[in-house]
Image: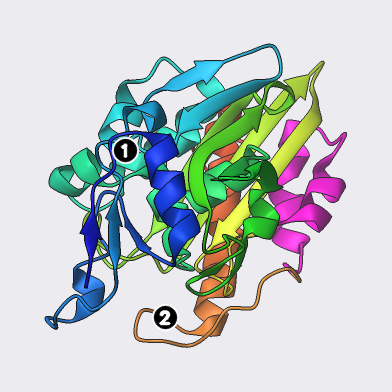
Amino acid sequence: MDYARPTTLEEALELMRSRPWTVLAGGTDFYPALGGGPVKADVLDINSLRELKGFSRSDSHIVIGARMSWSELLEAPLPPVFDMLKQAARDVGSVQIQNVGTVAGNLCNASPAADGVPPLLALDAEVTLTSHAGKRHVPLSRFILGNRKTMREADELVTAIRVPMAACEGRSGFVKLGARRYLVISIAMAAARLVLDSGRVRGVAIAVGSCSAVARRLAGLEAVLAGASPDAVPALVAAYGFPELAPIDDVRGTASYRREAAREIVARALAQAAGEVLGGGIAA
């Protein structure tokens, strides 16, 4: 096993070009995945790369550095529509995990229960992949291919997450269902972004996690809700069949329970985004 700790992004990319490495960022999932066994892979520790910290904004995007921790995200002065991502940040493990775990690492781990994925899907986020040859920007909806599988090539690092300014309008909500309130892997979770205008839904984005191998945007429900009045939203959600989801039975819940839970938490996330009771007795 070899271990390298580059101090610049250029140095890291040169190493990535030389041979395959296992990238170590926050490390919150890296060591538990070993199951108590030895480290056998060559490890590239990117925790010294200051270039991947912080966030920035331009006329077109808000850019979150790949090494931004969940705790740093919670303190960042982001637009209100990022509230769903900050709510997810509070549910990522313990405070100690939030202090070292990174937003990009949560995506690269590619767990179906990754807390950050539904909010970022609802923000139309893109993943910036950088290699010695250059950069490419991949929609998050395409980046995660399945359980623990992503589009990242062996010579690429995730260097940032980009959210288009067009998705930064409106407000948002996030609801996570687990066996207890904290320190739990989700049974189901939902994120919703909502833009209301003149008493109608002008824009909506909804994503559900832990109910498929990959978190999914609910494009069909978004189309149903477009142009609806807020009071009609709960009934429209209740009548929707959720065909995008493919839940499974496991130790945390059955497929049928997950499907019904998704219906409820989507309605609650939308209510949070609206900042009011959307009829049907479902409060934000």
Q: Say if 112 sits above or below 142 in the image.
A: below
The residue singled out by tag 1 in the image is 70
Q: Amino acid at mark 2?
A: Gly
Percent position of residue 111, x then y: 44, 67
Percent position of residue 52, x then y: 40, 32
Disc 2 packing (10 Å; few <14; some 14–19; many ≥20): some
The front one of 81 and 165 is 165
Per the picture, the main secondary structure of the magenta-coloured stretch is: helix
Q: Is residue 18 magenta?
A: no
Disc 1 element: helix
Q: Is residue 79 visible?
A: no
From the image, which quarter does the N terminus lie in?
bottom left
Percent position of residue 54, x then y: 38, 24
Q: Is residue 222 magenta?
A: yes
Q: Please tell me the numbered disc located at residue 253.
A: 2
Q: CA distance from mark 2 to mark 1?
A: 27 Å
* Residue name at image x 60 percent, y 49 percent: 267
* Residue name at image x 41 percent, y 87 percent: 250
Residue 267 relative to residue 183: left or right: right
Residue 106 relative to residue 93: left or right: right
